[in-house]
Amino acid sequence: MESSGTADSETIYETAPDTRQRILRVSTELFGVHGFHETSLREIAERVGVSKPAVLYHFPGKADILGALVEPMLRELAEALARAAAASGAPDGSGASSGPGASSGPSERARWAAIEGVLDVWLEHRHLLRLNFQDMALATTGPVFAQLRDAMLRANFLVAGPNPGFAERVRASQAVAMLSDPVVLFADAPVPALREAVLDGVRRLLDGPQGPNAPHGPDGPARPAPGGRRGRPAAMSPAMIEAARRMHAAGSGATAIAAALGVSRATVYRHLPQEEDTE
């Protein structure tokens, strides 16, 4: 009778409502340290403090844990792209309007809504994105990979705009691709400075350094990124200074940092450690 009570207590503990969240939290930590492929279910169970069958009770396999971690990111990505499609004013989200010679305004709004929406999702889930960069974890689960692939194709479609030529399609794919790598490489940088620098780089690709089009937010054109103004600011905000120092510590030179933040090299040099201020 006593042993039965112990078994019952263990079962209750292992299937407690918060166990699932603890498994997800521990899995995130272990995947981040060892990678998805090198982390076993047994290791996860030991760290959570439950048996391996208890983990399997909540998740049939390791891929299901990853799927649960990725689900919020995929949901937010789909929502962001749906908002971008709605911004085009066309039922199919193509950006095309009904009359001949119609303004390209709606497609431009859709383009930047897609760019900013995808970037904001990547920033929110930047550490999960870094995990995928480390060992391509998301490529191991069929449904998850398919959803991510379809979302990226949708983003490319919205960024390319209506009736794109080959060059426009290539630039759209470049623009969408360049949203993720900086977020992975500088995941620990201040988010506002990182977001601003990434958007400025995309704008330069699509419109040129002094192009007329700027990112659009829900209330109209967004504030230009630092590098998008004529002339370059002589001062850097605390967030920019922190971003510059992190980039420098990661191996970026003053020229690359200045280009990313939209300031002069001299401005960058003033905020780098004195003993390391040369390239």
Image (cartoon, rainbow, N blue to C red):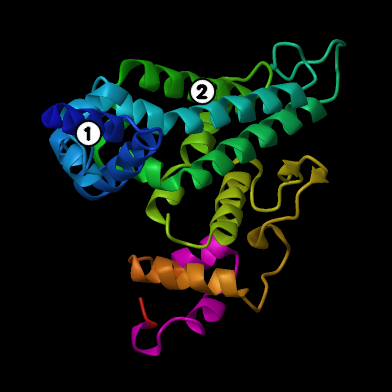
Given this view, does label 2 or label 1 mark the residue nearer the observer? 1
Q: Residue at x 31, y 25 (%)?
A: 58
Task: Locate residue 61, reporting x and y percent.
Answer: 23, 22
Instruction: Find residue 72 and report its horizontal and vertical position in percent.
Output: 50, 32
The residue segment tinted magenta is 256-276
Q: Residues within 10 Å of mark 1 (few under 14, many from 20)?
A: some
Label 2: which secondary element: helix
Residue 212 drawn above or below residue 59? below
Q: Which mark is residue 10?
A: 1
Within the magenta stretch, is there residue 258?
Answer: yes
State if disc 1 and disc 2 touch (CB < 8 Å).
Answer: no
Give whichever of 64, 264 is nearer the camera: 64
- State the CA–CA distance, disc 2 to disc 1: 42 Å
Q: Is residue 264 magenta?
A: yes
Q: Which residue is mark 2?
A: 151
- Going from N to C along the chain, the mark reached first, 2 or 1, is 1
Report whether 116 appears left or right of 142.
right
Which residue is found at the position 23% from the left and 37% from the top? 36
- Look at the image and tell me whether residue 115 can be seen: yes
Residue 140 can be seen in this image: no
Residue 108 x/y as whole percent: 74, 32
For label 2, the crowd category at 10 Å Cα-Cα, with few meaning under 14, some 14 to 19 and many 20 or more, is some
